[in-house]
Structures are given as structure tokens and as C-alpha cells.
Image (spheres, rainbow, N blue to C red):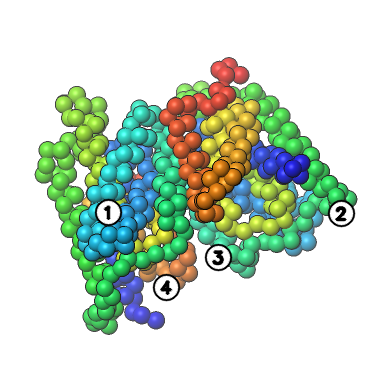
Amino acid sequence: MPPIAQYVFNGLVTGGILALPAVAFSLLWRLLRFPNFAVSTYLTVGAYLALALNHGLHAPIGLAWLGALAGTGAVALAVDRIAFRPMRDRRPFSLAIASIGVAFVLENVVRFIWSNDFRSYDIPVTRAMSVAGLRIGRDQLLILGVAIVLMALAQMYLFRTRLGIAMRATADNPLLAAVKGVPTERVVAVATLGGGALAGGAGVFLGLDASIDPLMGAGLIISVFAAAILGGVGSAPGALFGALIVGTVEEVGTILIPPTYKSAIGFAIIIVVLLIRPTGLAGARA
Amino acid sequence: MTSYLIAIAILVGIRALLTLGLNVQWGLAGLVNLGVVAFFAIGAYTSALLAVGGVSLAAAWPAAIALASLAGCGLAMVALRLREDYLAIVTLCFSEVLRLFLLNESWLTRGANGVTGIPRPLHARFAGHYDLFYLGLVLAALAFVYWALERLRRAPFGRVLRAIREDETVAAVAGKPVFRFKVQAFALGAGVAGLAGIFFAHYLAYIEPNMFLPQESLFVWLALILGGSGNNRGALLGSAVLLGLLEGSRFLKDVIPFLTGVQLAAAQQILVGVVLVVLMIRRPEGLLPERPGH
């Protein structure tokens, strides 16, 4: 059996991937006041967009990744305009149900085009490094690094730019923000675009780390919820730490229980957090 | 063709039961349950495993309903204090974890192989036209549940639930034990879903974990919203229309013959998803809106 440190490292990589959709899900939840179940499907969309660029146009994976960022952001924006915008003033539950419908449509569009087969990207094979007895893949390091940089950028955007600050104001109190002249719809559009892009980029990472199939995003949905709730809904750094913890606990947990129960660990985390500290680690008002 | 229609009618009946169960929780009490398929699965598995193990159906069926109800009660105790968006997440996750349990605990559930040879009640006596008999059975159960729920809806219990749905605080101020009513409504709905699961398992005589995917909960919601939540007639209509949609789109193959099997299934699901989203935007009150005062 590999040392525990190996599980922790793999967990951190999973957590890094998880952090991107978790931040998107968490911020959009706070901003629009409903849990958007389609966010985890944006991972699938991103992975397949990159696949189309990588296989169809022979784009190198880095370029395909950028394409997936832009493409998934655009898909998320289109979804928001078509499905969610006409329902802005409805109760959270109606929007949540509609978002499940959207997820279902997107997943099946992917299935319609690419079928149920497992796929992978055309990338040069690299050998895993061995550091202090740990197997560390080069793309794993890259994934972790890029995920952390993206998180830092998101955080800077939220605190240093006008629109980012407007976004936080709208999340706190939409009415007051609107009265103060914050362009609510523009804020929502930017957040949706950014959230979609983050999730789409994570999908490519997931495809590199594991494999690509129409259910890849949906399979992560419980872990994404767990990360966002653990971190505290609406907090970007909270979602990052939540994701790293959830990823690590799920990975290390496979020492004790079968790996097929990974999402059960996520569910247990959700229940425990909601019972003990519903506001999550970051303690934002729920 | 007749036998096909009878089979469809049986499935509509089972779906209608499931929808009625959700209507107690959501339509009547306003409780979000995105994991309704979990209680359907608990009913199906409990009854199937007991029956295959030699327990008589007269004992297996009540046990299955009781266990589904109990599970609903347990989940409700944990989750019903949460805000509705959290409740949506918790119930959905619950059904997924239950499916994982069914897949992995093969010592109890036979895992991915599923449960085979589930006995069909009175099969020997009605050999030859068994489906017709089974349809009668399902319809009788449906009629009974419908009647009971209609009575309940008009009874003080139903009125309190509707009051809680409209404004919890007012109901609490009026001295109603809100939490207890909610848990009861949730458990009752779960029990009805469990009954639907029983009919499902003993009709197909075979069940496996992937029959209980989260999308099944989505279908139940679609049926409920389509028909019009809050009233039981709507739940019946919605179930029939939904199955018409699912079955009807099967004939897409005749219109567009170049689609593969996977593409056809995907197209069907896309249609279902689009209908749901359009419905939520355009007509959230459904085909038969709840009449005020009834």
C-alpha cells in the first residue's frame, strides 16, 4: 500500500480541481439565491469542448483548455439568459428545479454528440516523478498550480476591481446594491461567465486526471456541494479550503472504505456541517 | 398492441402513485424533496428482498411501506429544519448515497446484479391475462390512495399542512406544532412512494440499482409540476402526460431512422429537460392549477 502522504497528495489535486466549480457554485448561489445544479455539468461541457478542439482541430491541450474556458463561459451565459433570467424573481426552489432540467439537457446534448464512450485527450505521455517516495504526475502539479493561481485571480477580482466589489455588494443585499447604482444584470452576467469558465476549465483538468465521459461532472456534484457548504456559501476562499479538505478526506477515506463510497463521504460532510455549523468555515451569513 | 397499452397503463399507475406521494410533501406541505426516488427504491428493495427470501407478501408489503416511511421520517428529522435550498441538496444527495449503498452492499442487495425472480402476486391463478389483473391491482391501490389523500387534504390535517406551506410563522403562532406536521407529511409521502416501489418491483420481477437514478426524481417532479402541484387530479394527469411524452418520443425512431440507440435516448431526455424548463418559465402552476378554497 502506498504511504498515506500519497493519498493526501492525490486528494489535494482532486481538491484543486473541485475548488473551481465549488467557488463558481458558491458565489452564484449567494448572488442569485438558488443552488445551480447545472454547475457540475459545466465540467462535462468544458471537457468535451476541449476534446473537440484537441481531437478535431489537433489543438495542443493548453490551447484547448483556453477554448474550453471561453466556450463553457459562453454556454453558461446563454443558459442564464434563456432559462434563469425570465425567472429571476421566483423562489429559489423553482430556479433549482429549472437548473436540474438544464443540467439534464446539457448532459444529453453531450451524449447525443459523443455517445457514452470513455475518452481521453491526445497528449504526450510524461513519466510521473518520484519525490520522497511519492508518485507525482507532472500534469497533477500543473493542475494544482493553475487551480491555485485561478483562485487567487478570482479573489483579487472580487476585492480589487469595481465590478468585483459590486458583485459582493449585490450578493450581500441586491436591493441596496441596485439602489446604489450597481448594474445588477451586468454583475450577474460577469459572474455567470466567470463561473462557467472556471467550471469548464476544471472539466479539462478532470479529463486529464481521470477520463472523459458524459457523467463525469454529475459524478462530482455531491463533492462540489460539500466543498461549498463546508467553506460557507458565498465565500471564495472558503470554497477553496472546503474543496481541498473534501478532496483530501474523500481520498484518504478510501483507505478505510471502498472508493465507490467517495460521494457518501461528501454527503456525511454536508450533514455534519449543516447540523453543527450551517454557516460553514468562513462563517458568512447563510 | 393491447398488451402494450396495458403495460403502459400499469406504469402510468405506478408513476401516478409516486407523484401523489410527492404531492403530499411538496403540493400540500411545501416540502422540497429532490430525492423522491430513494423512497421508491426502499419500497421496491425491501419488498423484493423479503419476498425472495420467502416472506409472504402480506408481511413484506406493509414492512416495505413502513421502512420507506421510517426513512422519510429520519431524513425529515435531520433535514426539515434547513432552508429550502439546503433541503433540495440534502434530499438529492440522500438518494444518490442510497443508490451507492444498493450498488455496493451486495451481501444485502445483490449489488449491480440486481434482485431477480421477484414473485408476482397470484401469478398462477391469473396466468394468461396476468397484466390485466395487475393493472386492476394497481388501479385499485391508486384509487384508494387518491381517495384517502383527497380526504386528508380536506381534513384538518391537510388544512394545517396547507397553512404551513403558505406561511409557517402564522401556522406556528396559531399554535400548530409545525415541525411535527412537516415530519408526518414527509413520512406519509415517503410511504406512498414506497408503495409505488412495491408495485414496480413485483411487476418487473427484477430490479437493479441503476433503475433508481436521480433523474427518476426529476421525472416525478416533472409529472407533478406538469399536472399542477397541490391537487391530486393534477398529479394523475401529469403522470399520464409524462409517460405519453416518454413513450411517444420512442417513435422518433420511425421519423428519424439514422439515429443510434444512444442518440435516440439522449434526444428523448433532451425533450424531457426542455419541457421541464419551459414549463417552469411559462406555466409553473401546471395544466390543472390548484383551486383556491378546495
First in sequence, mark 3 or 2: give its number. Answer: 3
What residue is pinned by disc 4? Answer: A255
Q: CA distance from mark 3 to mark 2?
A: 34 Å
Tell me if mark 3 has few (under 14), some (14-19) or many (20+) residues whose alpha carbon lies within 10 angstroms of its own.
some
| Residue at figure coordinates x 16%, y 52% from the top left | A153
Which residue is found at the position 42% from the left and 73% from the top?
A255
Q: Which residue is mark 1?
A: A68
Q: Nearer the viewer, mark 3 or mark 4?
A: 3
- Look at discs 1 and 4 and give the one toward the viewer: 1
Residue at 53 percent across and 32 percent down: it is: B225
Query: Mark 1 is on which residue type?
Result: Ala
Question: Circle 4 sits in a helix, a strand or a loop, which is it?
Answer: loop
Q: Is residue B212 above or below residue A252?
A: above
How far across and down, in percent of the image, does residue B150 sit? 67, 27
Using the image, tell me which numbered label, if any, was put on residue A109. Answer: none
Q: In this rendering, would A185 be left or right of A43?
A: left
Which of label 4 and label 2 is nearer to you? 2
Residues packed near mark 4 inside 10 Å, few (<14), some (14 to 19) or many (20 plus): few
Farthest residue, direction top: B293
What whole-number distance in Å separates the C-alpha atoms at marks 1 and 3? 35 Å
Dot 1: element: helix
Q: Give residue B95's position: percent from left, percent from top.
A: 52, 51
Marks 3/4 same chain: no
Asked whether A21 or A49 is in front, the reply is A49
> Which residue bears the numbered disc 2?
B124
Q: Are marks 4 and 2 on the same chain?
A: no
Instruction: Determine if marks 3 and 2 fall on one subunit.
Output: yes
Quarter occupied by the C terminus of chain B:
top right
- Which amino acid type corresponds to the residue marked 4 in the rendered image? Ile
| Residue extending farthest right | B125
